[in-house]
Every structure is written in C-alpha cells, then in structure tokens.
Amino acid sequence: MGNKILVTGASGNIGSALVNELKAAGADFAVMTSKPGTAIAGVETRHGDFADIGSLTKAFAGIDTLFLLFPLVPNKVELARNAAAAAKAAGVRHIVRSSGAGADAASPFALPKLQGEIDDILAGTGIATTFLRPNVFMQNYANYQTQAIKDGTIYAADGGQAQSFVDTRDIAAVAARVLTAPATHAGKAYTLTGAEAVTGIEAARLISAAVGRPVQHVSVPTEAAVATMNQWGMPPFIVNVMDSLNHIISAGYAAGVSPDVESLLGRKPRTFAAFVAESAGTWK
C-alpha cells in the first residue's frame, strides 16, 4: 500500500528541515501552504487554509499520512477541529502532529493545556495518531536572542533552571522516521529533548567562547517578563502562553531528558555545544 505524505508548516524551523529529510529519504510527499502562488521548489505544493475546512479537505485528498503543525494563534483549537474534520472527510489514514512536551488537557499551565486539548481532538477522530512532543528549541537562541547576544546580555525568566533544549533538525529527523513508517508508531507519543539539560549561564558561556566576547545570562522574575512583553505590545494570548512556559521552566519542569530521540534515530541528539558552534556566525 502506498504512503502519500502531506507536510503542513513546511516553511518553518521544523517543516523546512523535514522537507529536506523527506527528500533525502525519497518519500512520496507534498506540502501545504495557505498562500496562493507560493511553492517549494521541486515539491508538490497544495493550497489549504486551516480556517477553511473545504480547502483543507481538498488539500488532504489522496493523502495517507498527514503531518500537522499549527500556528500559535488564539483560535488554534478551532483550527485543529477544522483539520480533524477535513482529515476524516478526506480519508487520511494516519496523523502525525508536532505537539509540545508535557501536553495535557488537564495541565494547570496554559501552553501544555492547549497542546493537550489539540492532541485530544485529533485522537478523537478515530484516525491513527502519533504525537511528537518536543521541548524548548535550541534555535530560539538564533531566532529570538540574536540581538541580545550581540548586545552582551541574555535576559530570561527561567528561575536559573536548566532546559533540555532540542535541535529542530532532530525533531524533523524523528518526524521523517515516523511519517515514512507510520504504522509502527500508531498510538504513540514521543517526548523529544536533547541528551542533557543546560542552564542559561552554561549556554551563555558556550556562546561567549564561540563569539569571542563576553555574553552574560540574567534570570529575571516571571512578572518582569510579563511587564516587558506587555510594553512591547505583544498580544495577550501570546503573553499568556509565554508566561506559562516561563513558569514551567522556572519550576524545573523543562530539565527532564528523554531517550526518545536516540531510540528513534539510533544516534544521540545534537548537543547544545554543537548548535552554538554552528550558529556562531549569526551572533557575530
């Protein structure tokens, strides 16, 4: 039986790396975009809008295995319901979702609660599911902290706690393994972390050595982080989600190390030190 794969979120950190993984594997796959007229070179591109069940059903037609990565928006749960309905209507046989570490609809924290609610919606479709639950991305240092690193001080509401950062390329590699052999992973959820937990101070030391100048890490109270996000004019939904993540990290819950990446890939996850060495040019 064939296995036609559709990748959503193909232009992001995980999705772009996943496209490369699937190309290398010679997989039969397409990507979905919500922007008409845009395409990824050399890859079948379909149009679908998570806000429009009809467009999703059309995009999912003929798809056996669906990779779902939803944007972080206030109506994310509604978008998940749309995707679930479209997947059922289109006859999708397996859903693989990029979720989040600790996803649990009963969580007292906003972000894992949101992730858990979405996972439950997808599991409730009756379609075989696999959930990938990554921890905090290493790439956040390159995507969001570049200016702070150039300025010499990284501020974070982390309570001084360590985090088992995971490289998004490892998440993509795991996703490719699951997508190309979905039946083996039906009904499973994998927590994706690095092989070690790194504190902000340790991260700053590694970055300092890589860029050749002092970079310090300063832990700030979660309340101060909320005040700053509000001053920046960030939407209340994003402030709430980020505040919940800061509380999770500050409580030490993001320090746990999972064996799932190594078990699935047959190699150890990329280290934070290796990521820093590769990214040094971004911060110079």
Image (cartoon, rainbow, N blue to C red):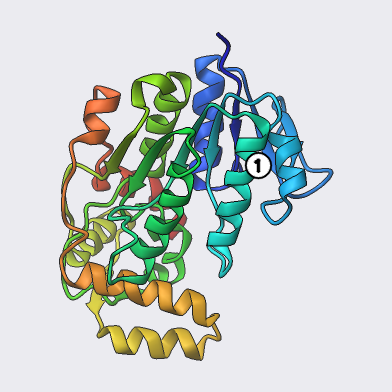
Amino acid at the residue labelled 1: Ala
The quarter of the rendered structure image containing the C terminus is: bottom left
Q: Which residue appears farthest toward the right when viewing the image?
A: 37
Q: Where 54 sits versus 221, above or below?
A: above
Mark 1 is surrounded, within 10 Å at the Cα level, by few (under 14), some (14 to 19) or many (20 or more) other residues, namely: many
Comparing 57 with 206, the one in front is 57
Residue 128 appears in the picture as rendered: yes
Q: Relative to residue 77, is residue 7 depicted above or below?
A: above
Image coords of residue 120 (percent x, y): 41, 50
The residue lying toward the viewer, choosing from 186 and 112, is 186
Residue at x 56% of width, y 70% of height: 74
Q: In the figure, 2 relative to 203: above or below?
A: above
Q: Which residue is mark 1?
A: 86
| Position of residue 99 in the picture relative to residue 64 (left or right) | left
Question: Where is the N terminus found, in terms of image quarters?
Answer: top right
**Which residue sits at x=56%, y=48%?**
12
Q: Residue at x 31, y 89 (%)?
A: 223
Q: Which quadrant of the view contains residue 65?
A: top right
Q: Is residue 284 visible?
A: no
Return the residue nearer the eye: 195 or 125: 125
Q: Position of residue 214 (x, y in %)?
A: 26, 69
Q: Nearer the viewer, residue 171 or 88?
A: 88
In the picture provided, is 230 more to the left or to the right than 192?
A: right
Q: Secondary structure at mark 1?
A: helix
Direction from residue 86 to residue 283 in the image, left or right: left
**Coordinates of residue 283 in the picture (x, y in percent):** 42, 59
Query: Which residue is rendered at x = 28% and y = 26% of the image?
Result: 264
Tell me how many marks there are: 1
6 relative to 279, above or below: above
Where residue 203 sits: x, y (%)?
23, 59
